[in-house]
Every structure is written in C-alpha cells, then in structure tokens.
Image: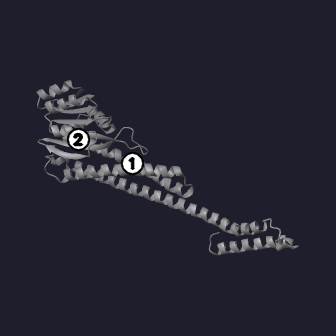
Amino acid sequence: MIRVQLFDPKTNCLQLGGAELIERWLLDTTLKIWVDLQDIPLEEESHLLKDCFGLHPLAIEDAQRPRHPPKLERFDDVIFVLLKGLDAQSDIMNCGTIQISIFVANRFLITRHSNESLSTNKLWDIAAADSRLIQKGTHSLALDLARLVVDRYLDILLNLEPRLEELEDEIQTKPKDTLLHELSDYRTRLKKMRRYLTYQVQLFQELKSGTDYAIDQSLTHDIVDIYERLERASSLANLYYELASDLMDSYISLASHHLNNIMKILTVVTVIFVPLTFMAGIYGMNFEHMPELHYQNGYYFLLGSMAFVAVILLFIFRKVRWI
C-alpha cells in the first residue's frame, strides 16, 4: 500500500492520494510530500526509493531488513531513522514490535513499515485533517511520529503497573502457579522492551547533542521532549522488569517456605511413628517363646510405652518450634 499526502505551500492546499502524486512532486520543487509505504514488493519499493527520492542503497537495505536494531544515520541531506514501535495488537499481555523506517529531508518524509502501525495511522489522520502539521516541515512531522511511537510504550507500561500491584497482593494472599507463569511472561516482554528503549534513548541522545544532522534549531525542544519521554519509558521498563523479577523471587521463596512447612509436618509424623512401628513390629512377631506376650498387663504396658514415646517426641518438637 502506498499512500501520499502532497502539500503545496503556495496555496496551503493538502492533497491525499497514491503513487500518482509523486510525479507531481517531482515536477514542482516547492511541494512537500509524505509517502507512507506498507507491505509492497521489495523490488518495487527499492525502485521507488532509489529512483524517485535518490535514497542511498545502504539505507534502503537497512530499512528492508526484517530485524535491525534502532539506528540513526545521515546520507547527504537525508536523515535515516529506524525505530522499534509496538504493533497494532500490543497490550499489557502481548507486546509485539514493529520496525518503522523514516527517511526525512527538507522536501519529503517517507515512512516504511511491513505491518500496520497505529502510531503512523494516528498521525496520518491528524495530518490529513490539519495541513498545519506538514506545513511546519517534514522534520517536525517526523518528530511527531517518533513522539507517538514513544507514547505507545508509555501507555502500555503505565497500564502494566496496576496489574503488577495486583500480582504482588495475590502472591501474598493466594499464590498459584498461574501467577508465576504470568510474571515470567511479563519479565520476558519487559526485557525485550527495555533493550529496544535503551537503543532509542541512545539514538535521540545522539540527535539531541549532535550537530551533524542539520535540523532546525526550533525543533530542539521537540527532540528534548521525545528524549525525556524515552528516558521515562526506559526507566519504567527497567523498574517493572526488576519488580517482576522480585515478585518471582518472592513467589519462589513463599513456595519454598510452604514446602518446608509440609516437610516439617511429614518429618514430625515420621519420627513419631517410626519408634511406634518398631515396637509394634517386635511384639507382632509370632515367635513361640516371647516372655512379654504372657504378661497379664503386657498389652496395656506396650500401649502406655508407645504413648509415652509419642508424648516425649511431641514435647521435643514443640521445644524446637517445629510444631
């Protein structure tokens, strides 16, 4: 799918369409264009990016790689940014990622993603309804997209916090194996999320402090704002990752404590009944010559001895606080 927004600064007119608007943009150097590419054949995409917009082959290759860490690079007057966003199906239980490639120059903004991007769709609808967004410039529009990508991370992370608090309470009151599985899933997703966020914090730190990208100074505050949002998201991901790890450790500790209590009870029962079983076993043997079997009160004496041994052992276990 190729969709295009073409803006004419002379008339403040914004036109929406497809690939046919690219030809108009090529013929008029005053026009600004935003091209959004999703799930089109790689050869067709490469031809469009290279022949119509003059993009560097290495930048195109990086954009088309299915798995690539976030990066920032300048090719002549074109800035190439590769971001890791959250896909359209992401929520607190499922955090899938989507790779968003951004090519931005003074006259054009190109966004490229293989699957649906909610952040791109949201900005597209806003820009289509208000031409002032693209009128401010393609670099400003690219930063608006980056801000929406980061905000999706923040939304997911902030929605996760109440659930982690609930899990903490449930572990204390009614621990179940399903809680451990859920915590393990969160921990795995947060581990991936904090890795992607760390890359992007470094990316915008470089953009914020670097002078090699020829970005208008009026956009400095926007870059700093995105950087601070990324830092917050990265801090939250780290915090919740540590919290999930701590909750898993707490669950395992409580489970071990519960198991130890069960083992104590089994040990007490075993230690009490071993001597009783031993005594019963001896006098249950059918030997002909066993003098004690002929005592008049031998049965009651044996029961008393067994009760005495059991009481003594219970007293000992009580003394050492096992019961």
Classify mark 1: helix, strand or loop: helix
Estimate the spatial distance between the alpha carbons at disc 1 and disc 2, rounded to whole Å: 27 Å
Q: Residue at x 23, y 41 (%)?
A: 142
Q: Position of residue 161 (x, y in %)?
A: 43, 52
Left/right placement of residue 213 relative to residue 256 reads left
Left/right placement of residue 282 relative to residue 118 reads right
Q: Is residue 145 visible?
A: yes
Q: Which of marks 2 and 1 precedes in the sequence?
A: 2
Left/right placement of residue 66 relative to residue 108 reads right
Q: Residue at x 35, y 44 (%)?
A: 152
Q: Write down the quadrant of residue 35 in the picture.
A: top left
What colour scheme has been applied to the protein in the rendered image? one colour
The residue at which mark 1 appears reads as 189
Left/right placement of residue 191 relative to residue 200 reads right
* Amino acid type, label 1: Arg
- Relative height, residue 85 to residue 299 (above, below): above
Q: Position of residue 25 (x, y in %)?
A: 15, 28
The residue at which mark 2 appears reads as 142
Residue 225: numbered disc:
none
- Relative height, residue 304 to residue 190 (above, below): below
Locate the C terminus by quadrant. bottom right
Locate the N terminus by quadrant. top left
Q: Is residue 157 visible?
A: no
Q: Write down the quadrant of residue 3 in the picture.
A: top left
Q: Residue furthest right?
A: 296
